[in-house]
Image (spheres, rainbow, N blue to C red):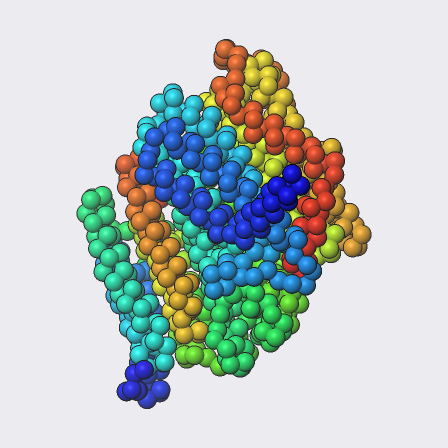
Amino acid sequence: MLSYSLDPKLLNQLIDLFAAFILVSSFLVLAIKRLYVHVRLYATQSFFLALVAFLVAAFGGEPHIFIAAALTFIFKVMLIPFLFRRIINRLNVQQEAQLTLNVPASLIVAAGLVLGADYLTRTILETNQTFELSRNVLTVSLSVVLMGLFTMVTRKKALTQVIGFLTIENGLFLAGIAITAGMPMIVELGVLFDVLVAVFIMGVLLYRINETFDTINVEKLTKLKG
Amino acid sequence: MAQIYDILRDGFSYAVGTLQDVSIFLILLVPLLSAILCGVIGKKRVMERTSVCAAFITALSGMALVSRVVAMPPGTSPVPRLGGLLYADALSAYLVLIICFISLMITLYSLGYIGYEYSIELFGKAKLRQYYFLLNLFVFTMLLAAVANNLGVLWVAVEATTLASAFLVGFYNREESIEAAWKYLIIGSVGITFALFGTVLVYFSALSVFKALGSPGTLNWTDLVNPSIATQMDPHILKLAFIFVLIGYGTKAGLAPMHTWLPDAHSQAPTPISALLSGVLINAAMYGILRFHHLLAASPVGPEFSSNLLLFFGLLSIAVATPFIMVQKDYKRLLAYSSMKHMGIIATGIGLGTPLAIYGALLHILNHALAKAFIFMSAGNLSLKFKTKEIALVKGIAKILPMTSALLLLGTFAIMAVPPFNLFVSEFLILSASFLGGNFLVGSLVLLLVVLAFAGFIFHISHMILGVPIKPLPPGEVNPSSFLPLSILLGLVILLGLYVPGPLHELLQQATKLVKP
């Protein structure tokens, strides 16, 4: 096993710091309208996620998370953003994301979501369970999940919806690391595989939506009612 | 002579025993191999034969699995396989039985239905290959969900069902079908991430118990429900986890208010796929909820919390579906909302929580799968001929498709739970359980909504069957090969309405104990 170690307090502070970066990148997705930046923010967020996973793996005594950290880096920091850039170039989409709720209002709602997440995690903490990591990380992960959901609801581009979905998944991954030091390996791998396939299928459907509707604005998808 | 007979008998029982032993692997391997074969070969004849053979072998293995599980002496638990990843008890065997049987019927039906659409060049060869590949893969993912022991693997399998069926929903590449596929994929995937969060929370609350006992953490259901673990888990976290799981799997099960993908996907998918989504997929999602329901009941939380939630969402689903049934304009959506209503009835039955109600709800799952596959297939023959899904544009089926109109009428009575059809029995069980248990409000509410839905349904269908055809179409069936699966299903729908066979009764009783210990 690894012989060197890190002061647990410092480790927790480092993880908290990276978790804060993860939270900030979720906020920025709501604040910035350009699609390219969204992709880059997703890559950044995943990068910090991989860092957190790496720290837990190296100093938290959970070596099996190394694999999850490495896979996160390969797929979420490199491969998926690369695919997204290709899709954006190919589809020739208009760069500005259209919003159903403007930026300041979105940010206020997002702040409310973080407070809600904090309240919810507080109730979990009341149950006197020993946490693997600090409660802040759980708050961040739940906030990221809620903000991803919020992004999906208020942004009209199909591509942004996919980013929102991936953000939700990032939040869940963080939660898994934060409170249980990672799920069993087979689950970790299965989830990652599912997400990859989901992104692939969503990409193909994006092309089809673009071909059929001449736009990837989901507001045009309104034929089915009742 | 007697010796030869003995040898033959020994050999036979040995073969049956071996089949029972490996059945849990066979039901997974056969559909997967068949999917790969279909994906590689791509010749119409070969794909059709492979799929039918695979579905048949899977159904046989499913029967073997059921017979093994039923024959288990009470008190012994079935041996988990693959290091505890796979596992089958009465509840999963019951679901396996439904999946295997309905998918066999659907595969038989696909030959005629998809074959006809291929022959009129609605789509090309590549699409045909895609269809059979994904159909087999879809069946595989559902079976994996049924026999997964690890709750994380269960989640992975349920998410995989969405992924395998998304392209099937968007199969025709029309505007509406792409819209339906997109909604299905997004709502399904996002909804189910909540179930993953719930699973993480369950793992979290179990982990400290495992650590206290000095064993490594695991998500295997068999370990979690072990009294030494389950009774120690934190009730607050489990409650929160169940809410997340209910939202997550409830989305896939079509419970209101997370049901919005359901009518779209059911109406836009090719009819065999609609039948599979409606008869099987939503049950597989419900199965996921039932596993957690059991876990909560075995823990300090007790069964009331999750029962009440299921009861609430069940009633809400029936209440939301009923008006949409009454004013529906599209007959495939009509069937979709009826599925939602029946899922609501099943959830209500589970929520009522008495053994009688749970027995009824479990029986309702099978009965609904059979009847819904039956009526979807009849409606599919109709849409092949009329090339529209609008109720207003279909009139006088009795004159143009006499056989199909008769089947559609029978299917309508079956799906509306009229005696002597099977759904009547299970619905009656649930209703009487609610009155016996003193839940008069629940019982009368369900009864009222069911009657309203019946009126709406029969109004729409009678308008389609009777009347003068709007366009003069030449009379004659276009999908005669469908009458084989249709008549098998019709036979079962009536048979199960008259009595529940012994082995099935035994299986159901064991499964009832697994829903609520």
How many callouts does the rendering have? 0
* Position in image of residue B328 (x %, y %): 56, 32
The answer, for residue B194, to whether it is visible in the render is no
Question: At which x and y percent is residue B223?
Answer: 55, 68
Q: Is residue A153 above or below residue A65?
A: above
Look at 24% across and 57% down and name the residue there: A79
Q: Residue at x 74, y 35 (%)?
A: B498
Does B387 appear above or below A171?
above
Q: Vertical placement of B263 versus A154: above or below?
A: above
> Which residue is at the far bottom?
A7
* Residue B320: % across, % down: 60, 44
Name the quarter where the N terminus of chain A is drawn.
Answer: bottom left
A128 sits left or right of A108 in the view: right
Q: Is residue B97 left or right of residue A141?
A: right
Considering depth in this image, is A80 or B39 the residue closer to the camera? B39
Image-based side of B414 in relation to B393, left or right: right
Tell which of B366 and A32 is nearer to you: B366
Task: Tell me the residue at 41%/46% (across/down).
Answer: B32
Residue at the location (43% across, 41% down)? B136
Percent position of residue A4, x then y = 28, 87
Q: Is residue A203 something that shows in the picture?
A: yes
